[in-house]
Amino acid sequence: MKKKLVKSLILALLMAAIPYIVLTLLMSLGILNSFWSGIIMLCGINIVLAVSLNLATGYLGQLTLGHAGFMAVGAYVSAILSIYYQWPFLLTLLIGALAAALIGIVVGVPSLRLKGDYLCIITLAFNEIIRVIIVNLKITNGSRGLIGTPHETNFTFVYLIAALTIFVVYSIVHSRHGRAIISVKEDETASELSGINITYYKILAFVISAFFAGAAGALYSHYIPVLVPKYFDYNKSVEILVMVVLGGMGSLPGSIIAAIALTVVPSLLISFSNYRMLIYAIVLIAAMLLKHSDAGIALKRMIPFLNKKGKEESL
Amino acid sequence: MDFINQIINGLSTGSMYALVAIGYTMVYGIGKMINFAHGEIIMASSYFALVGISSLGLPPVAAIALSVVLTAALGVITEKVAYKPLRGKGSLEVLITAIGVSYLLQNVFYLIFTSSGKTFPDIMPQGSFHLGGLHITYITLITLIISGVCTGVLLFFIHKTKMGKAMRAVSEDAGAAQLMGINVSSTISLAFAIGSGLGAVAGVIYGAKFSLINPYIGAMLGIKAFIAAVLGGIGSIPGAMVGGLMIGVAESLTISYISSDFSDAIVFGILILILLIKPAGLFGKNVREKV
């Protein structure tokens, strides 16, 4: 039994290492130019965001629209520590993520009593309040943006954090706690009657999700030259939620693929910048309508990888 | 006196929010969904009125009527195309689709009219008058009168006509209403048409009040009106009116006595407080969860 575990762990590490080695080689050989390596970094950050939101929305089943707010907290806390105190990057990343988790507790404890649409709206409101506070603070330089954050984020860090996020979320979901979290989604009353502390698990999943959003924010703030609060408005939260929904609620590979696709495709459409959002909107509506139409269900059956997920959904 | 003046200004802005909030509340009450694209439908109505007056040369009243009709049609079309196929398929998909529709409308109007603001023609008498020590602009007064008349007509329709009765029945229990021979599908469409039509009135008022419109005005207007609907208890029409007026007054007082930078944050703060203290809103019904 133990041998099997070690074997699968080594296999997982190998699987995780291969894309890293391949991408690093391609970048250092110059086959992937700076445009593409930029996209790859953003892909990594979006994977962290989508996978962490999937824990709260996909597995726990709580519809939240405030992920960009937690990302903003992580981004600004880490950037300020780097600029004004010259702390090392990984320490600021950790503190940024912890700050986001703390805000996650502050937001989550009152909000998670609500459900469905109401929860969605209250998290959106917290997102906007965080943004307005950042705009009005002096230390964040308001809406003009924060300049001078050291450019510390590199591919290795992004890859490591993304892998860590996937590993942590995967481990939680496949543990005893994960089963408790999933049971909360399936039926709150029934899981409460089975002795599960639903408030505790709701807040736990929500806070872990906020923690990694904060980490993603720290990666982002040490990657872009100017950090503006406008980036963290509710459209960013929607973008992350769309990744989770398009990839499939409660599917880690789905979130990863959707995060990559929704980063790469808009970047490629940059020359059609006027029509980009229009295409995005049409794809969004079409994807949702197709998902529930007969054609969409037939398409799903044809792809075995998606089929498995379809079965899980029907349970 | 200044305080009373600010309250009157707030009531005027609030009555505009109320007209938009009624759209949210009717659609939520009857269709059980948040129409996230409602703000963008109102943005569209401002442009319809603008085109009617500036390009077609219609008199203001005809342009407003045209805008109301076109906006109601737009509301019904969105419902038929985007929301109807997803009815009863889970709120998340409907939410994402509604967000998609709002992006779509924003970008269609952006491509047609560009992102630069368009000046809205003066369709209401400018200037102001004094009443006692109060200083009231004509636009403020007209806004209050129009909103009052619209909501009065709506309340009459909901409570005194057969179609209104059908709407109330569907919002109470769609399944039972269908068994009584009410066409649920067309009732939902009617709710979208009325909500969008009233929103068009608010859209024209917005244009006249701020005299500058762009494709992004709907987003904030929509969110504030939605907060008003939640504040009043979503699903309740009197609630939406009271909620709209309260949000308007709160915003006006914040801008004049605290800071205009924080007015949005305070409006969102009100929403959070209401949801935490009384999630059903002021006029909402408490629904007990049954096992």
Image (cartoon, coloured by chain):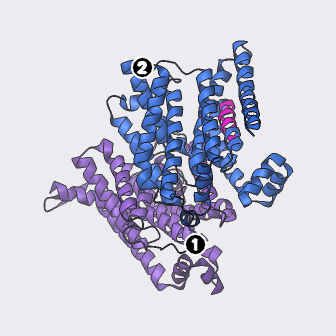
Chain colours: A blue, B purple
Could you say whether the residue bearing mark 2 is in a helix, strand or loop? loop
The correct choice, above or below, for A198 with respect to A142 in the image is: below
Q: Quadrant of residue B175?
A: bottom right
Q: Position of residue B75 (x, y in %)?
A: 58, 62
Q: Residue A303 versus residue A6: which sits nearer the camera? A: A6
The residue sitting at the right extreme is A302
In this view of the protein, which residue sits in the foreground, B247 or B78? B247
The reply to whether discs 1 and 2 touch (Cβ–Cβ < 8 Å) is no
Q: Quadrant of residue B123?
A: bottom left
> Where, by quadrant of the figure, is residue A23 drawn?
top right
Amino acid carrying mark 2 in the image: Trp
Q: Which residues are magenta?
A: A258-269
Task: Report whether residue B91 is seen.
Answer: yes
Q: In the image, residue A269 lies at what x, y percent?
A: 68, 33
Q: Residue furthest bottom?
A: B180
Q: Tell me the residue at 59%/32% (across/down).
A: A45
**Where is residue A84 drawn, in percent x and y?**
36, 20
Q: Is residue B27 above or below residue B125?
A: below
The quadrant in which the N terminus of chain A is found is top right
Which residue is more in the foreground, B129 or A259?
A: A259
The overriding secondary structure of the stretch rendered in magenta is helix
What residue did someone put label 2 on? A87
